[in-house]
Amino acid sequence: MRLNLFIVALLLIGSQFGYGQESKVYRDHHTRKGDFYFYWGWNSSRYTTSDIHFSGTDYNFTLDKVIANDRPTAFNVDPYFHLQRFTIPQYNFRIGYFLNDRYSLSFGIDHMKYVMQADQTARISGEIRNSGTEYDGVYDDEDIVLAKGFLEFEHTDGLNYVNVEARRIDELMTFRYFTLALTEGLGGGVLYPRTNATLLNNDRYDEFNIAGYGISSVLGLQLNIGRHFFIQSEVKGGFINLPNVRTTNSSSDTASQSFWFGQFNVVFGASWNLKSKG
């Protein structure tokens, strides 16, 4: 519930500061029209609880209000700056183009990690038959411990949100070589997770799959350093719907879930204009 309120507040703040009024702009020595930009950085993520429905040849059941967390990687030169391992941490990548001085279109990947909390107690409804485990039976809104022998479930390589965004930027102030700006935007895209799941006595499954879609909004504060470089902090949130999560090697075994998410991002970027000599 708190995360839902956070998402609504994020949308309201973005509309109030960006689209509802014109802010006073202090222009620097260049315009943004025609600029390309790129950034890379890292995120910390949060998720609401979700109801997860599992269906297959021998089972059809739903787990209510399942708790999940992210899995941040301890900051170190390896893997954060390792040429072959830098995609292991939770990262944000984006490349965009300014249509005019304020509005840009961009493409990006938000690499989050979603890990179901182990050994939590959830409510289960449905049936499990012929699994060869102690969990065979019919369930009617009963408690069950999500132990290792029953279910391991995570999107850890990762919960990949591949998205496009429309963004606006408003400069707040300029001091010598530094410009402070507010940026906000709306976006949407597909979820391409690599789900790591072990369900009942099935073999572990760990493959990429287009599992659903997401929508999001973002609010950021950008510090430009000179003409070409910037540091940016972002608060981002939205809704994810995953109707087609693979759980075993059999395509008949699937899971579905939906939840709200929030991110706090710190990114580092550069901008350039192919026609400019400056």
Image: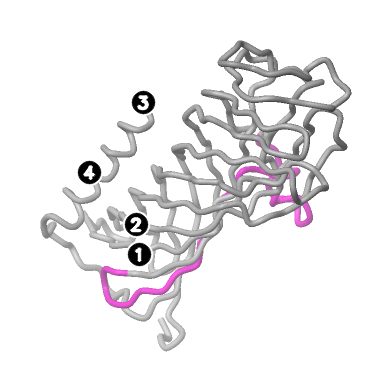
Q: Is residue 172 left or right of residue 42?
A: left
Q: Indicate whether 8 appears above or below 20.
A: above
* Residue that mark 1 sits on: 166
Q: Residue at x 43, y 80 (%)?
A: 273
Look at label 3 and name its amino acid: Met
Magenta-tinted stretch: 75-103
Picture disc at residue 186: 2
Nearer the observer: mark 3 or 2; the answer is 3
Nearer the observer: mark 1 or 3; the answer is 3
Mark found first going from the N terminus, 1 or 3: 3
Quadrant of the drawing holding the N terminus:
top left
SS at circle 3: loop
Give the class, few, some or many, for how many residues have Cα within 10 Å of label 2's Cα (few <14, many ≥20).
some
In the rendered structure, are the residues bearing label 1 and label 2 in contact, judged by CB atoms less than 8 Å apart? yes
Nearer the observer: mark 4 or 3; the answer is 3
Instruction: Give the Cα separation between the discs numbered 1 and 3.
Output: 27 Å
